[in-house]
Image (cartoon, helix red, strand yellow):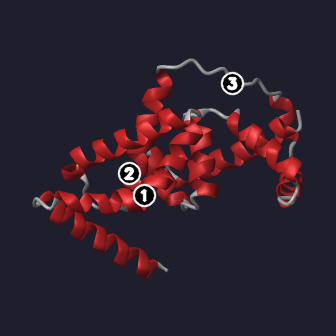
Amino acid sequence: MRLSYNMENQEELIYIKRILEGETNLFSCFLEKYSSSIYSLIVRIIPSREDAEELVQDTFLKAFRKLVTFKGDCSFSTWLYRIAYNTAISETRKRKIILPLLDEKMMETLTDDDMDTLFERDEDEVLLQKLEIAIDQLNVEEKTLITLYYYEAKPVAEIAVVFEQTTDNIKVKLFRVRKKIYALMNQ
């Protein structure tokens, strides 16, 4: 699997080089490939579909303008997710979002088994609805973590690049977010 990632990354680097040399129409390949993933991330942060669509456009416009700064030290998709995340965060700063308060003591008593039992029953429609409602109540960073890790299946190392944090820090945050989701679902 590592080989295919490297080949994909190399192909993207070739496209980027060609775009920077004047073949700007090739940027549409990145739009086709990543727009739905970027939308999926942004719509988790900004619940308005119209606003999310606009922010996806902003993300790609920023990426195009900053393409010369892409160094290739991470995958293009990771770099693009970072731009999308920052774009969405900037938008949330313009809005006031009220987040629910949780009993921190109750969250501390949760075990891995409690959470695993809940998340294993993924066929239960009521449970899935509760899960969506709980995710909607998370803060922006938590929604982004959940989206990248569970919905987009990004490895922890790539998520760490997006957040500019260590992989250990991301693992701890993912663990805490799972606990928070469990608590929100059982309030």
Residue at 60% in and 50% down = 147
- Mark 3, Cα crowd under 10 Å, few <14 / some 14-19 / many 20+, is few
Q: Give the amino acid type for the residue marked by disc 1 in the picture.
A: Tyr
Q: Looking at the image, is mark 3 or mark 1 earlier in the sequence?
A: 1
Residue at 32% in and 63% down = 29
CB atoms at circles 3 and 1 under 8 Å apart?
no
Q: Give the amino acid type for the residue marked by disc 2 in the picture.
A: Leu
Q: Which residue in the protein does label 3 denote?
A: 99
Place of residue 11 in the rendered image (x, y in percent of width and height, measured from the top left): 29, 73
The one nearer the camera, 47 or 72, is 47
Distance from Cα at disc 3 to Cα at disc 1? 30 Å
The one nearer the camera, 62 or 174, is 62
Residue at 54% in and 62% down = 155
Query: Toward which corner of the image does residue 71 lie, by quadrant?
Result: bottom left
Q: Left or right of 116: which side holds 70?
A: left
SS class, disc 2: helix
- Mark 1, Cα crowd under 10 Å, few <14 / some 14-19 / many 20+, is some
Label at residue 80: 2
Q: Give the amino acid type for the residue marked by disc 3 in the picture.
A: Leu
Distance from Cα at disc 2 to Cα at disc 1? 9 Å
Q: Which residue in the protein does label 1 denote?
A: 34
Image: 184 above or below 81: above
Q: Nearer the viewer, mark 3 or mark 1?
A: 1
Distance from Cα at disc 3 to Cα at disc 2? 27 Å
Place of residue 146 in the rendered image (x, y in percent of width and height, measured from the top left): 63, 48
SS class, disc 3: loop
